[in-house]
Image: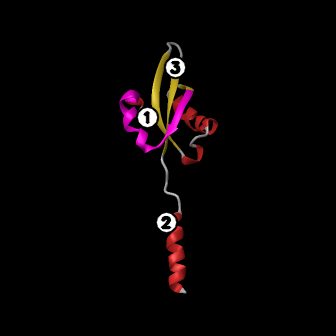
Amino acid sequence: MVRLILSIGLVALFALPARAECYLDYKAKQDDPLRLHYGVAQVSDAVCGDNGAARAELEPRLAMDGWQLIKILGFFGPEGLDERTESAGENFLRY
């Protein structure tokens, strides 16, 4: 009986979802003078894939430096980071 309980416990432990990492790429702007930037940011797993919730999480971070979020381009996992590093430049995981 103890083995059965331990086996079920181990199966349940390994069946838990792994902590996923969620990233998005976005466009932001500043006015007067107009400046634009492309960036990559990490957002919480809870908002992954939800534009409205992700916007609410990212906008305050950008606003601290005077940036306004224009558009979320898409969501991706850690496998998409390498291909975006160069394009995002100094705004790679900055916000």
Q: Secondary structure at mark 1?
A: loop
Name the residue type under label 1: Arg
Q: Secondary structure at mark 2?
A: helix
Q: Earlier in the sequence, mark 2 or mark 3?
A: 2
* Quarter of the rendering containing residue 12: bottom right
Q: Secondary structure at mark 3?
A: strand
| Residue at image coords 35%, 30% | 86
Which mark, by number, is residue 14? 2
* Quarter of the rendering containing residue 39: top left
Name the residue type under label 3: Gln
Along the line of sight, the residue nearer the viewer: 80 or 53? 80
Q: Earlier in the sequence, mark 2 or mark 1?
A: 2
| Residue at image coords 51%, 70% | 11
Q: Earlier in the sequence, mark 1 or mark 3?
A: 3
Name the residue type under label 2: Phe
Disc 3 designates what residue?
Answer: 30
Magenta region: 71-89
Along the line of sight, the residue nearer the viewer: 22 or 32? 22
Which mark, by number, is residue 94? 1
Q: Which residue, as the protein is rendered here, is positioned at the far top?
A: 33
Magenta segment includes 13:
no
| Residue at image coords 41%, 29% | 88
| Comparing labels 2 and 1, the label whose residue is closer to the camera | 2
Confirm or deny contact between disc 2 and disc 3 (CB under 8 A). no
